[in-house]
Amino acid sequence: MPKEGDNESKEERTQDAPEETVRKRVRANTPSPHRGNTPQASPSRFVSVEELMETAKGVTNMALAHEIMVNDAFQVKPAELPEGSLERKVKEIVHKAFWDCLEAQLKENPPTYEHSIKLLAEIKETLLSFLLPGHGRLRSRIDEVLDLPLIQQQAENGALDISQLSHFIVGMMGSLCLKQITDIVPLLKAIFSVLDLMKVDMANFALTSIRPHLMQQSVEFERSKFQEFLEKHPNALDYTEKWLEDTVRCLREPGADGSSAATSDPPLLLPVNVHNHAYLRLLRWDHTSDPFPETVLMDQVRFQEMHHEAEQLVLLSSVLLIIYTTTGEAISGLPGLMETLKSTVNVLLADMHTPSFSAQEALATIGEKLCVELSQCLSQHGYSPLSADRKSTLRGQISATIQPDNTIRKLMESRVQNYLLASLESSQHKTPPPLPGGLAPVSRELKELAVRFSRLINFNKLVFSPFYQKILHKILTTGESPSTET
C-alpha cells in the first residue's frame, strides 16, 4: 500500500496552520515599543532561517500541547480531503493504481508478491504498535507468523499462501466484518481500512492516558517559551499589565468600564480576587478595539466563543423569564413546554453574532411565535388563550430586551456573570456553586460553559502565575506602574 506521502501537502498545511495563526496574532497584538511611558523594546535584529524554523516548530508544539490541555474534547480525527479537491483526486488515483497493480501481480502465473510483502510488513508494524508491554505472547505470535525473511523465501520458492496470512491478520484484529470477505485484494483493502481506524482509536486512547501526565510538562514548556519571548521583547507584557490595572480600577470604581458591576459589594482587592475578575472581563471584551492581553492571546478565539455563548444564554434566559412572569401560573409545570419554548428561541438566536443578524427582527419574530405556541398550549390544557393585551405586553417586553440597559437583561447578565465568577472561585474545591434564580432553563448550557471557562483559566494561571504575581504585587502594594522586568 502506498505510504501517506500523497497526504504530505495536507499534513504540512495542517501543521503550518497553527504556526501561521499564532504568528499573525502575535504580529497583530505585540505591543508597540513607543506607547506612552512603557519601556523601549530592544533594537530589531536579523535572525537566520534556522532560528525562524526552530521558533516555528516550538510554536507548533506549544499550540498542540496547549490544545490538548485546555480542550477536554480534543481528539485525533482521520484526515478527510475535501470532496472534489485536487488532493483527493490525486490520492484516489494513486491508491487505485496501487490496488490495481497488486491485483494484477497476484493474477500473474506464477504470482508476483513484491507489493504483497510490502503490505504485510506495514501490517505487522501497525499490529505490533497496538500491543502493550504485557502482550508478550501476542507479540511472539505475530513475529512468528509474519516472519518477513521467511515470507520472502516462500515467495521466491512459490510457496507463499497470502490467503492464510490474511486470515491470520483478520483473526488478530478480531473484526468479524472482515471474515466474510474471501477475495485477497478486497480483504487486504478492508484490513487497511480497519487498521486506519484502529490507529485513530489508539491515538485518542493515548491522549486520554497521557493528559494528566502532560500537565506539568506543558505548563513548564509554555512558561519557558513565553520567558524566551519576553527576554527578546521586553514590552511583551504591556497589555497584560494594562488589563490587570484596569481591573483594579473597575473594582475600586464599579462601572468604570461601562458595564454593570459583577457583584453588589466591591470585593477585597486580594490578588486572587483581582485576577478572577480580570478573567471575567475577558468575556465582555471588545475584540475590535482593545488589544487582547498577551498571556491569553493563544486563547483569544476561545474567549470570543465563550463571550458569544454567555450573551446568548443571557438573552435566552431573559426571554424565558419574561414569558413565565407575564403568563403566570397557568403554564407552570406543563410538561415539555419549557423545552419547546427554549428550542424556538434558540433557533432564532442561533446566528446572533453574525454580521447579517438583526436582533430587532429576531426578537419581534420570537415574540410572535411564542404567543402562538403559548396560546395553543393553554388551549390544549383547558386554559383560556392569551388575550390581545397580554400578547401585546409579551411581545413588547421581549422586543425591549434588545436594549443593553433593559432591567431584565441586566439582571440575567449579572446572574450569569456571578455564576461564572463563583465557578472560578470554587473550581479548586471541586464544588459547583448554587444556580442563581431564573437560570434553571439554561442550567445545562451554563454549567458546561462554566466548566470550560474554569479549565481554561486554571491552566492559564498555572502557566503565567510568576508573571501575574509580580504585576499584581506592584499594583496592589505600591500603586506604581509595574515594569516588564522578569
Image: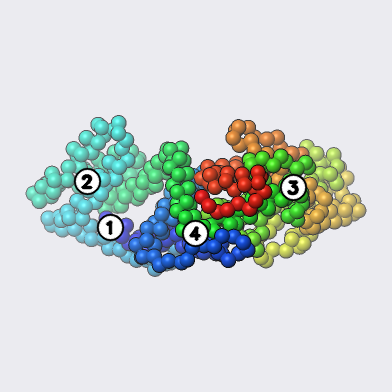
Mark positioned earlier in the residue sequence (3 or 1) = 1
User: From this viewpoint, is residue 81 visible?
Assistant: no
**Disc number lying in front (2 or 4):** 4
**Is 108 on the left or on the right of 206, as rendered?**
left
Cβ–Cβ below 8 Å for labels 3 and 1?
Answer: no
The residue under label 2 is 163
Residue 76 numbered tag: none
Q: Amino acid at mark 2?
A: Ser
| Secondary element at tag 2 | helix
Q: Amino acid at mark 1?
A: Pro
Give how far apart the Cα atoms at labels 1 and 2 are: 21 Å
Q: Nearer the viewer, residue 352 or 461?
A: 461
Give how far apart the Cα atoms at labels 1 and 4 are: 46 Å
Q: Amino acid at mark 4?
A: His
Q: Residue at x 25, y 40 (%)?
A: 168
Within-10-Å neighbours for mark 3: few <14, some 14–19, many 20+: some
| Secondary element at tag 4 | loop
**Is 247 on the left or on the right of 401, as rendered?**
left
